[in-house]
Amino acid sequence: MFVIFRNNSEERLINIDLISAIMKDENNEQPCFRVEYPSGWFKFHSLEWNGFFRGTQTLADVWLALRYFERLQENGWE
């Protein structure tokens, strides 16, 4: 499943099945996270899948958003 990871200046379409880690970036004042995948890493603060947008304040929000997107896909929201 592909999800758009977005920050203030760019966005990347990443296959979440290939993600090796997601962690909070402690160097920023605003909530910011890093996703590591085969092409490198990317800092982000929000996620989007199939028109559904989710801002992320905590690492738990990231996990919940990805799980929510997976459930929507399982239920035919493609």
Image: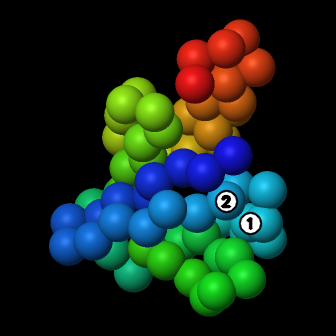
Question: How many other residues sit within 10 Å of disc 1, few (<14), some (14-19) or many (≥20)?
Answer: some
Which amino acid lies under the numbered mark 2 shown in the image of this protein? Asn
Would residue 78 be seen by someone viewing this image from the given angle?
A: yes
Q: Is residue 20 left or right of residue 13?
A: right
Q: Is residue 7 left or right of residue 52?
A: left
Q: Quadrant of residue 30?
A: bottom left
Q: Quadrant of residue 29?
A: bottom left
Q: Residue furthest bottom?
A: 40
Query: Between residues 55 and 17, which one lies in front from this camera angle?
Result: 17
Label 1, on which residue?
19
Q: Residue furthest top?
A: 75
Residue at the spot x=62%, y=88% of the render?
40
Which amino acid lies under the numbered mark 1 shown in the image of this protein? Ile
Residue at the spot x=46%, y=33% of the render?
50
Question: What secondary structure is found at the residue carrying circle 1?
Answer: loop
Point out the image quarter for the C terminus.
top right
**Count of numbered circles in the view:** 2
Residue at the spot x=59%, y=70% of the render?
35
Question: What secondary structure is found at the residue carrying circle 2?
Answer: strand
How far from the left and from the top, in percent, is residue 26? 46, 74
How far from the left and from the top, in percent, is residue 34? 54, 72
Label 2, on which residue?
15
Q: Quadrant of residue 70?
A: top right
Query: Between residues 28 and 11, which one lies in front from this camera angle?
Result: 11
Q: Are marks 2 and 1 in contact (CB under 8 Å)?
A: yes
Question: How many other residues sit within 10 Å of disc 2, few (<14), some (14-19) or many (≥20)?
Answer: few
Q: Is residue 12 left or right of residue 62?
A: left
| Nearer to us: label 2 or label 1 | 2
Q: Is residue 17 left or right of residue 29?
A: right
Would residue 24 be seen by someone viewing this image from the given angle?
A: no
How far from the left and from the top, in percent, is residue 47? 44, 47
Disc 2/disc 1 C-alpha distance (Å): 7 Å
